[in-house]
Amino acid sequence: MSYLDYVRQFKLPHYWCPGCGTGVVLQAVVRAFEALGWKQEDLAFITGIGCSGRMSTYVNANTMHTTHGRPLAFATGVKLARPEKHVVVVSGDGDALAIGGNHFIHAARRNIDIKLVIINNLVYGMTGGQVSPTTPQKFRTQTTPYGNIDPNFDVVKLAIAAGATFVGREAVTRPRNLEKLIEKSFQHKGFSVVEVISNCHINLGRKNKMKDQITMLRWISTKTIPKNLAEKKKPEELEGKILLGIFHEDKNRKEYTELYREIQERAGGNK
Amino acid sequence: MSQESKHYELRFSAVGGQGLITTGVLLAEAMVEYEGLYAIHSPRYTAQVRGGPTKVDVIIDNKPIYFPKTTSVDFYLSTSQQSFKAYFQDIKDDAIVVLDSNLVDEFNDPKYKVYRLPLIEIAAKKIGNVVTISTLSLAVTSKLTGLLSLKELEDFVPKSVPRGYEEINLKAVRVGFSLV
Amino acid sequence: MRKVMPGNENVARAAIAAGCRFFAGYPITPSSELAATMSALLPKAGGTFIQMEDEIASMAAVIGASIAGKKVMTATSGPGFSLKQEHIGLACMMEIPVVIVNVMRGGPSTGLPTHPSQGDVMQARWGTHGDHSIIALTPSLPNEIYTETIRAFNLAEQYRSPVILLLDEILAHTYEVVDVPESGGYETANRKLPPKGLDRLDFYTYNRNVGDPPILPNFFMGYNFHFESLTHDEMGFPTTDPKKVDLLVKLREAKIEKNKEKIWENDIRMVENADVVVFAYGSVARSGIQAVEKARKDGIKAGLFRPITLWPFPDKPLREAVGNKKVIVAEMNTGLIKREVERALRRDVGGIFKANGTPITPEEILGRIKEEK
């Protein structure tokens, strides 16, 4: 099957702004499906609200466009009902880390086999560009007209601390690396998190002297550095840099639906 | 239970954790099982899980019970002064009132048939485990009201208590029946 | 099965008998024992129980499991019911079968956690935002709690709708005799599914008659179907086309409104020759039954109208049964359903309204009957 078979081509052209990184993530995700040969009928693809949320319209599988911040809670129900199926969630920084922060840390704590991709474009894009938990400090947004004072979440550290068993980060500026990372995370048994640094030049860039996608993508390139290259740098050279790569992989921790199967067996109910 | 007395209301009050709620539960279950009657019980807890006043009301009837709250209590057993006072409402004039003589103050209202027994002390010392207060109280209640016979309790109690506690609870039932 | 058990356990056992195989919940008084019973029974039945991180998540999880093909339930009380409203709306929009138990306690806010109330009856109907139809049931008696729980699942499956089962603290916590045939002997309904192997483009989900519930696939049936929280078109994809929006709104409303006669369940006692009719539901109706029986013994012609389906509201059956007779509404709130009774009868009615955490007694209702007659 070609990666295009995983796209509802009759729904194209897509809804995102020209130059938006969300399309890059969509392609990386469907290429990972192709590489793994997953059958569409065995695949649930669930999103929340925001620009990332619209991705479920375009993925040709069992899809669900849910409420703001809660796709992981729906996915938990789907996965527990049918543990043998693949369950993928794509979310955004506002969706997963602000309104959905609670669902995020608890899905990670359980280590339920859901594959989460967070498109972190550093802003609430769809609603017109308001500050999010990952908007850099000093940046101007619609709701921080004098500059942002809010400290940020480090998604990688948060995911590891909460108990995710596969945690990685990439940027839309490195699409091939992104595909490989997503594919690897999809192969992991347990709760996996891939954070993707993405661009919103329309609703964040324009307010911060990055009017077009090229300028913003260049900025992302200079802000990010692959982990293996960073290891050779001095600490002062890495100040303010965002590292890319795999940060955590634990293959030993038991997955949640497997643990529940043991409960069913102990209760004498597994047929 | 005689044919005429078709409706009987009982109340057990204590301090949370003492085990009197269990007495109410066991009584209701036994009445359903052995007498084929309708029985309900409504426990009232407070947010304080241990040490707060608690009570359980039990209603027994030979018809389906619609209003599930007591309105005229025929029998009241209490093992705590605070709870005894807190739940002394709707007690019938000729009601049987059983009080733990160590834990509830003197109470000599001639309207009621008052029995004072050191229930918790008997459970702890004479029977040998304070948890038997539940079945000891069940036996005292059964004897005084005539709701259940010793034979029925000897059959019911061993299968209703945690495994390993059958013998000691049987002892409590027999002691309870001999007390009053 | 003849067993002494509280309403919370009763609902759990009935749910298993109805085929419920997934429960997600969050602890809250006075509904917690329901979740606890499900946590023990479900794995034995090959089903799944999960305690989620909050009420919002537990409502989401049951919707997810329902879309994946399970019969599902969640249970909560006042404050938790408020949190569940977000996803009750989603279940209305996506047309997902789910059963939600709300054990009513005093409110608003944290209110009276260990005391009964009927203050959520309007929230059950109108709690989530936007125009929607919904079904809510108010059983009163122990055997009825069992059978109405099964009916709640059947209605959810048949009409692809959230069904709210309203209990209160008294019904949930009172241990009483439940005497019903062993599980397995009840008629259980299953949602209609499309036959397998259709070309998905031939499969127009919303292309149905007004009044028919939709036929939707479950996940993993081979249809790459899209469940959408936005207002959607006949294929399930987002739309803002006013004509299509109109149609969807109408279809969702009609599937319940046009089938009201089948959904209504009322217990009407001695109303025909009555001078005074007591209108009561849930635990208060039990006081109503006792009061009316006593009144008849005292020679007063009293009757009872007891809705077991509260929503959709039984306006027509009420009008037909009661006509111009005097009506006393008794409810544990400030008179919420009284307004519906007045709307149905097109006149003012009186009643007994109590929202202080104590039950309405048979004597209070009897006293009122005597005043009215």
Image (tube, coloured by chain):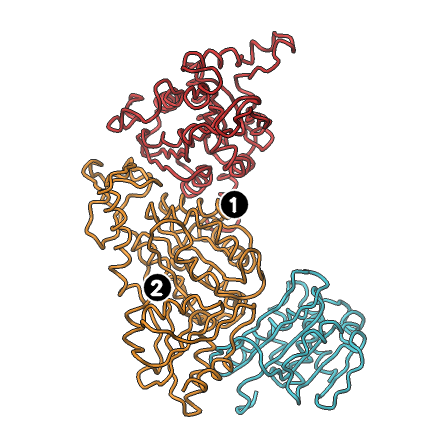
Q: Which chain is cyan?
A: B
- Work out whether C370 lies above or below C16: below
One can see residue A255 in this view: no
Secondary structure of the residue carrying tag 2 is loop
The image position of residue B21, as x and y in percent, is 64, 69
- Residue type at tag 1: Met
In the picture, measured across the screen, residue C332 lies left or right of residue B138, that is left
- Residue type at tag 2: Tyr
| Residue nearer the viewer, A50 or B96 | A50
Which quadrant of the figure contains the C terminus of chain C? bottom left
What mark, if any, has residue C186 been given in the picture?
2
- Work out whether C359 lies above or below A48: below
Q: Colour of chain C?
A: orange
Which quadrant of the structure image shows residue C318?
bottom left
Q: Colour of chain A?
A: red
Which residue appears at 36% of the width and 81% of the height?
C326
Q: Residues within 10 Å of mark 2 (few under 14, many from 20)?
A: some
What mark, if any, has residue C298 been given in the picture?
none
| Mark nearer the N terminus (1 vs 2) | 1
In the picture, measured across the screen, residue B147 lies left or right of residue A43, that is right
Q: Residues within 10 Å of mark 1 (few under 14, many from 20)?
A: many
- Work out whether B64 lies above or below C215: below
The residue marked by circle 2 belongs to what chain?
C
The image position of residue C292, as x and y in percent, is 42, 83
| Residue nearer the viewer, B176 or A194 | A194
The image position of residue C206, as x and y in percent, is 23, 45
What mark, if any, has residue C52 been given in the picture?
1
Q: Nearer the viewer, mark 1 or mark 2?
A: 1
The residue marked by circle 1 belongs to what chain?
C
